[in-house]
Image (spheres, rainbow, N blue to C red):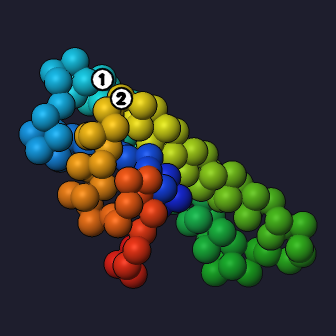
Amino acid sequence: MAKPAELNGYPGPAHVLDAADELNLPQETRERIEEIFAAMQAEAQRLGKLYVEAEQRLEEAFAGKSVSSPADLEGLLKDAERLRGQLRMVHLSAHLETAPLLTRHQAMLYNKLRGYGTETGHHQHGNH
């Protein structure tokens, strides 16, 4: 959900916390990133559940042959895609909040630990 951020120098809170010792994160930074992660996780779980339900409604509409017009389909799709967009926003926003909490050195080290080729995180190999 957050590859554009991750691959361009905006680290995610979960990965930063996983590498907290290697990054030598100060306790206050670690605690703030834990808060960002907890908030992201709670909202992502809530939205993820709603998104799955919207996708199930779409599936059920086709299975039950109740989609009879493009307007019917459009409503179902808009609902699912709106939720998917909100879910992605939650993930990308967490990256935006996390990035400024790292020093330049920590960001460089993070990118190295994650296997990214440059300081800004531009990806130089095809694993993502």
**For residue 11, above or below residue 40:** below
Pick whichever, 39 or 97, lies toward us. 97
Q: Residue 106, image x and y in percent?
A: 26, 40
Cβ atoms under marks 2 and 1 closer than 8 Å:
yes
Residue indicated by mark 1? 32
User: Of the residues tagged 2 and 1, which is closer to the observer?
Assistant: 2
Pick whichever, 85 or 109, lies toward us. 109
Q: Is mark 2 on a helix, strand or loop?
A: helix
Q: Which residue is drawn at 45% across and 63% down?
A: 122
Residue indicated by mark 2? 101
Q: In this view, does 25 lie to the left or right of 92?
A: left
**For residue 40, above or below residue 127:** above
Q: In this view, does 120 lie to the left or right of 83?
A: left
Which amino acid does the dot numbered 1 rest on? Answer: Arg
Q: Residue 19, image x and y in percent?
A: 17, 46
Which amino acid does the dot numbered 2 rest on? Answer: Leu
Label 2 CA crowd tier, 10 Å (few <14, some 14–19, many 20+): some
Image quadrant where residue 56 sits: bottom right
Q: Residue at x 55, y 51 (%)?
A: 88
Q: Residue 54, image x and y in percent?
A: 61, 58
Q: Which residue is drawn at 17% across and 47% down?
A: 18
How many numbered badges does the structure rendering display? 2
Upstream in sequence: badge 2 or badge 1: 1
Q: Is residue 79 left or right of residue 56?
A: right
Label 1 CA crowd tier, 10 Å (few <14, some 14–19, many 20+): some
Q: Residue at x 17, y 40 (%)?
A: 23
* Outermost residue to the left: 21
